[in-house]
Image (spheres, rainbow, N blue to C red):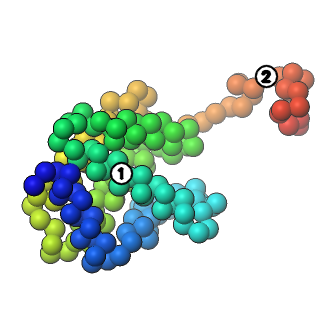
Amino acid sequence: MSHRDAIEASLALAVEHAGDPQTAVYARLFARHPAMEAEFWRDGSGRIRGEMLARTFEMVIDLADDHAPEGGWGGAFLGTEAVTHASYGIGRAIFADFLPIVAAVIREACAGGFTPAMAAAWETVLARGASVLAALPGSSSAPREIDPEAILPPPAERGLFFPLR
């Protein structure tokens, strides 16, 4: 069984045993990083979290592909999302915790059906993900701090597009 097949089997088994893993994934994320819950203030329906998790599963399946050991699309997507989330002030350490949280939730949801092949596939995905994140320039767990005055034109030159103080 390929890593990709094992990942897909683990996801199917997890859903069969426990249903949609979204609630469990985000509950664990918020328990580990309580400040993250406030980042989802616009997500009253859970659709943003659902979309993020769906994209994560697509990325995981691609990272598991034995034909793309450098990460393929999944690695590029992970790197891009790490940079995007850094611009939101989400530190790399917090961002890097998400994939292991997802893996743990899936493993627990599979219960006794989690096979050695599934474990090996998830270990590969986690190792490839960690490698992608470690290779990014400016890897840091500190939130990004921006001084708007350092990047915006002076107030008199901002025109109609920038609010005046």
Q: Is residue 149 left or right of residue 52?
A: right
Vertical relation: 21 (above or below) 98: below
Task: Give 92 or 40, whichever is nearer the viewer.
Answer: 40
Residue at (9% x, 61% y) in the render? 116
Q: Quadrant of the C terminus?
A: top right
Q: Quadrant of the N terminus?
A: bottom left
Residue beneath label 1, please? 58
* Residue 9 marker: none
Residue 159 screen position, x and y as percent: 88, 27
Residue 130 screen position, x and y as percent: 29, 41
Task: Give 147 or 130, whichever is nearer the viewer.
Answer: 130
The three-letter code of the residue at mark 1 reads Glu
Residue at (40% x, 26% y) in the render? 137
Residue beneath label 2, please? 153
Residue at (38% x, 41% y) in the render? 78
Vertical relation: 90 (above or below) 153: below
